[in-house]
C-alpha cells in the first residue's frame, strides 16, 4: 500500500544520485522507481530523469529534477536518531565526506543542499533530563559541537 503523504524534494538535476546515496547510507532506505520525461521541459529534455521515488529511513519521498529555481533551506531537515557514537559518526561522515558540509549542534548539509540532523538518542534524553541543571549542562555542551559527541554530552549531564 502506498503512502498518502510523500515528501517532495526539489533538486536541480541530482535527484537520482541523491536517492542512490540515501539508499546506500541510511537503513530502511531504497530507490523505488525512476521516471523519465516524456518530452522536453524548461529544465531538461525528453528522456532525462524527471522524478525518482525513494524511501529515506522509512519516509516516502519524491525527488524532482526541477532545475535551479528552488534551493533547499534549513526550514526542512531530516532528523535521524542514532543509537551510539559509531552510528552517529558513520552517518555524519558519510554526508560530510560526500561533498556535504558541517553545521552546528548535530546539523549538516549534504552535497545537494538538504539539511540533516544526526541526533543521538542520548542527546534528546539529556536535554530533557528532569533535573534542569543537568539538562542545561547537556544543552550548553551541545551548543559547542558540530557533530555530537555522546561522551561529552553524558559527562556534561553528570556535571
Image (cartoon, rainbow, N blue to C red):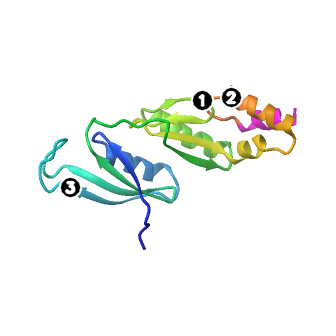
Instruction: Name the residue at the bottom extreme.
Output: 1
User: What is the tally of numbered marks visible in this picture?
Assistant: 3
Circle 1 SS class: loop
Circle 3 SS class: strand
Q: Position of residue 27 (x, y in %)?
A: 53, 56
Where is 73 relative to 37, above or below? Answer: above
Numbered circle sitting on residue 36: 3
Label 3 crowd bin: few (<14), some (14–19), many (20+), radius 10 Å: few
Whether tag 1 and tag 2 are in contact, CB under 8 A, the answer is: yes
Q: Position of residue 139 (x, y in %)?
A: 74, 33
Residue at which label 1 appears: 104
Q: Position of residue 20 (x, y in %)?
A: 38, 50
In the image, residue 73 lies in the stretch drawn in magenta = no
Q: Nearer the viewer, residue 22 or 113?
A: 113
On the rendered image, what quadrant is the C terminus found in? top right
In the image, residue 152 lies in the stretch drawn in magenta = yes
Q: CA distance from mark 3 to mark 2?
A: 44 Å
Q: CA distance from mark 3 to mark 1?
A: 37 Å
Q: Which residues are magenta?
A: 150-159
Label 2 crowd bin: few (<14), some (14–19), many (20+), radius 10 Å: few
**Residue at 62% of width from left, 46% of height from top?**
87
The image quarter in which residue 152 lies: top right
Residue at which label 2 appears: 143
Q: Position of residue 108 (x, y in %)?
A: 52, 34
Main SS of the magenta part reads helix
Q: Is residue 155 left or right of residue 98?
A: right
Q: Earlier in the sequence, mark 3 or mark 2?
A: 3
Q: Is residue 115 left or right of residue 85?
A: left
Circle 2 SS class: loop
Q: Earlier in the sequence, mark 3 or mark 1?
A: 3
On the rendered image, what quadrant is the N terminus found in? bottom left
Q: CA distance from mark 1 to mark 2?
A: 7 Å
Amino acid at each position: 500500500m502506498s503512502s498518502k503523504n510523500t515528501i517532495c524534494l526539489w533538486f536541480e538535476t541530482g535527484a537520482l544520485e541523491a536517492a542512490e546515496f540515501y539508499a546506500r547510507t541510511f537503513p530502511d532506505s531504497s530507490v523505488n522507481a525512476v521516471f523519465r520525461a516524456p518530452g522536453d521541459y524548461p529544465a531538461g529534455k525528453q528522456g532525462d530523469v524527471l522524478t525518482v521515488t525513494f524511501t529515506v529511513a522509512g519516509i516516502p519521498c519524491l525527488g524532482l529534477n526541477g532545475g535551479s529555481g528552488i534551493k533547499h533551506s534549513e526550514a526542512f531537515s531530516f532528523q535521524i536518531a542514532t543509537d551510539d557514537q559509531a552510528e552517529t559518526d558513520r552517518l555524519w561522515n558519510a554526508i560530510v565526506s560526500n561533498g556535504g558540509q558541517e553545521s552546528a549542534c548535530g546539523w549538516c548539509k549534504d552535497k545537494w543542499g538538504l539539511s540533516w540532523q544526526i541526533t543521538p538518542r542520548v542527546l534528546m534524553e539529556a536535554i530533557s533530563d528532569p533535573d534542569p541543571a543537568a539538562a542545561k549542562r547537556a544543552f550548553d555542551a551541545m551548543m559547542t559541537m558540530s557533530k555530537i559527541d555522546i561522551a561529552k554530552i553524558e559527562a556534561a549531564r553528570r556535571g
